[in-house]
Image (cartoon, rainbow, N blue to C red):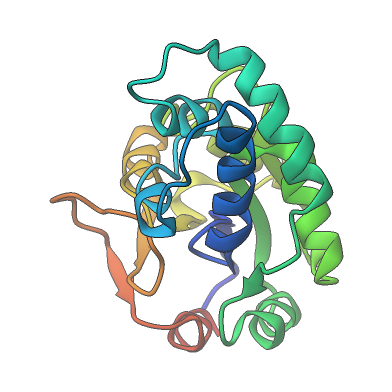
Amino acid sequence: MLPQLLIFDLDGTLVDSRADLAASINHMRDGYGLEALPQEVISGYIGSGARDLVRRSLQGADLQVDEALRVYKTHYDANLAVHTTTYPGVLEGIPKLAHAGQTLCVLSNKPGDACRAIMRHFGLDGYFTRIIGGGDLERLKPEPEGVITCLEATGMDAGQAWMIGDHHTDLVVAKNAGVKSAYVSYGFGDRLDLEAVVNFASFSDLVDYFV
C-alpha cells in the first residue's frame, strides 16, 4: 500500500483504559459522598472529553462540574497507567506500521498531557508525528480541526489519510475532515448507525491491511 497517514483514536483503539478512568471517576464521586458507578456505566460516558465524562458521571447530583473535573484530573493524572493496557497487537503493530512507511498520529478527546504520558509509558510516543488531545486545540472531535492539524503537520493529503477509532465521533470527524474512516470493533465505543470505509476486528487485522 502507498504511504498513508493513519490517525488513531486512543481510548478503545490503542489502549483499554476503562479501569483507570472508572477508578478516577469513582474516587471523585466518593469525595462527594456518592456511590461508585459500575465500570460498564462509566465506559459508556467515554469519548467526548474529560469534562463531558465528569458531567455525565454526576447526573442527578447538584455539584459544580468544573470543581469535580479538577478532582478527577488530579487523581487520573497520577494513576493513568495502573491498569491500562494496550490492545493485543498494538505494541508490535505500531512499529511495524512505522517501518512500513506509514505516518502515524494520535487524535483523542482525552486531555493531551494524559495522551502523551500514556504513549510514553508504553514506549510508543516516538512512532507518532503528533499526539493531540483535548486542550491542545480549541475544538474536540468531531470538529475537523485535529485532523486538519495532523494533515498540516505531516504534509499529507486528505486523500491519503485515515481516521481510525472505536467511537462515532471518530467516524463523524473523518467525514467532516474529508478523510477515510476505519472502525475497530474490539473497542468500547458506540458507532451508532454510522458506517466506516473498512472495519477491523483486531489490531493485527488493521496492521495487515495497511502493511
Q: Which residue is pictured at 60% across the width and 69% down the height? A: 3
Residue 13 % position (x, y)? 50, 64
Judge from the rendering whether residue 199 lies leftward or rightward of residue 118; answer left or right: left
In the rendered image, the residue lying farthest to the front is 33
Residue 98 screen position, x and y as percent: 72, 75
Left or right relative to 178: residue 81: right
Residue 36, position as x, y percentages in the image: 48, 46
Question: In the image, is 155 to the left or to the right of 141?
Answer: right
User: Vertically, is 122 above or below 79?
Assistant: below
Q: Position of residue 17 (x, y in %)?
A: 59, 61
Residue 46 visible in the current orientation: yes
Q: Depth check: give the residue in front, 189 or 150.
A: 189
Q: Nearer the viewer, residue 170 or 34?
A: 34
Quarter of the C terminus within the rendering: bottom right
* Residue at 56% from the left image edge and 44% from the top image edge: 26
State which quadrant residue 59 falls in.
top left
Residue 152 in view here = no
Q: Is residue 198 left or right of residue 78?
A: left
The residue drawn where x is 43% and y is 11% is 62
Count numbered badges in the picture.
0
Who is closer to the viewer here, 74 or 157? 74
Q: Residue sitting at 63 percent across and 24 percent down?
A: 69
